[in-house]
Amino acid sequence: MTYSIIQKSQLEGSLRLDAEYYQPEYLDIGKKLHGCTNLDLISKKITDFGAYSQMNFVSYVDNGVRFFRNQDVDEFFINDADPIYISQETYRKLSLNLEEFDIITPRVGTVGNASVIFKYHLPASANQNLAQIKPDQKKIDPLYLSVFLNSKYGNKQFERLSTGNVQPWLNLSQIKSIKIFIPSYEDQMMIRKISEKALLEINSSKKLYQKAENLLLEELGLKDYKIEDDLSCVVKLSELKSASRIDAEYFQPKYNKIIKFFDNKIDTLKNLARRKTLNVEIIKDTEYNYIEIGDVDVGNGNINSNKLIGSELPANAKIKITGGELLISKVRPTRGAIAIVPLDWKKNFIASGAFSVFDVEPPLREYLQIVLKSIIGKLQMEKPTTGTSYPTITDEDVENIKIPVLSRNIQQKIAGLVRQFHEARKKSKELLEEAKRKVEELIEKK
């Protein structure tokens, strides 16, 4: 049992009486940061973006000015998986805009992450759920500050200060009160250099992924392909009966048009890879590494897992993982939650039944990941979806996806780029973990 004994004088002026706020872990962090500076004292400005993102004049466009939301804020880096944009006209009407080396962090929902804005993100703005921190660079290095906020000493303060159960929430005064450890200039520069190396790796990974996708699309003549929604189409009664569907969306011509680009070199996924169908028997007292849909980063294909005792696993925890499998999400499939399981994930790994899981060898495995995350895969997974707010597809839908089969030489080139992409991502993550670890060591030595 974990508990704390708190004196009345320690009740933060009676502003917080909930036991959660006084967890031993939080108290220990507070003790180690005693005497440190409040975030607002080393910032030129800490503010939010108001309620304008809900106003009538804000509408999204295909290309324009980047507009950030909670899901775009990762540890240190902006997540580019599913960007949205606003027009220049809308941007000019907004009262707050972002600048280089600003830090943005969620105030609602997924509190705790903090991302740096770099020059290549600009111009940009954000919605009302994010806070804008503008570090005073005469007092603190912004890259160091971001690493600190993402370390346990920053993250746990966000977590402790947040209120609400279903949806954690932070107000600006709480964010301003976060304690910041400021080491020597030399130590800040050490952390900054590690962060800059991580930034180089992440930017390299983006280029590698784009190169792999471009190679695929160029080989298929789809490099500049534009998806168009036809206003109408003619469908035979026999097609309705065959599909057992009568919704117009299902029969949009765009779904068949893309297949015609590679219909002379095509196969189905079920003929190229074997889907795992056997469910594993869960032992209640055994610890498992559980993989669910949210553990797949839709932007980069990285994958995480959560440790759970067998008795705590959801009913949908079904598929035994032995390393190297290709996971394809059947829930909101067009998001691109498609990942390759690390080869060393062998013992007591379990995947959610919301994935279709395939055994497939390289280079086809990496090639399939690129195909399925491209417009080729996304359009085919969009067509059979059922449901509106939570669209899903079936294992059979996934197995019937048509795959363009390019030469083995091209597959190997694409697979090589994908492997380099994952290595660069892994290296970037390792560097950021190193930076956070060094920040934590500096605090623990002070």
Image (tube, rainbow, N blue to C red):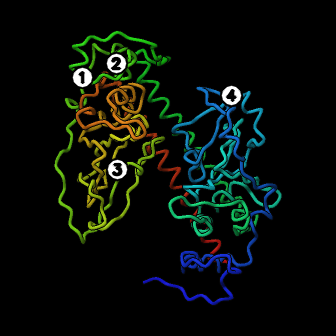
Query: Given the image, on which type of amino acid does mark 3 rest?
Result: Pro
Distance CA(mark 1)–CA(mark 3): 37 Å
Are discs 1 and 2 less than 8 Å apart at CB?
A: yes
Instruction: Specify whether 227 is left or right of 53.
Output: left
Which circle, 2 or 4, is nearer the viewer? Answer: 2
Are discs 1 and 3 less than 8 Å apart at CB?
A: no
Query: Given the image, on which type of amino acid does mark 2 rest?
Result: Phe
Q: In this figure, which residue is indicated by the disc labeled 2?
A: 251
Q: Residue at x 72, y 49 (%)?
A: 102
Is tag 1's residue or tag 2's residue first in the polypeptide sequence? 1
Q: Residue at x 67, y 33 (%)?
A: 56
Callout 2: helix, strand or loop? helix
Query: Given the image, on which type of amino acid does mark 1 rest?
Result: Ala
Q: Which mark is residue 87?
A: 4
Is tag 4's residue or tag 3's residue first in the polypeptide sequence? 4
Distance CA(mark 4)–CA(mark 1): 40 Å
Residue 168 lies, in percent from the top left, at 56, 61
Quadrant of res 186: bottom right
Is tag 2's residue or tag 3's residue first in the polypeptide sequence? 2
Which circle, 4 or 1, is nearer the viewer? Answer: 1
Is tag 1's residue or tag 3's residue first in the polypeptide sequence? 1
Which circle, 1 or 3, is nearer the viewer? Answer: 1
Q: In this figure, which residue is indicated by the disc labeled 1?
A: 243
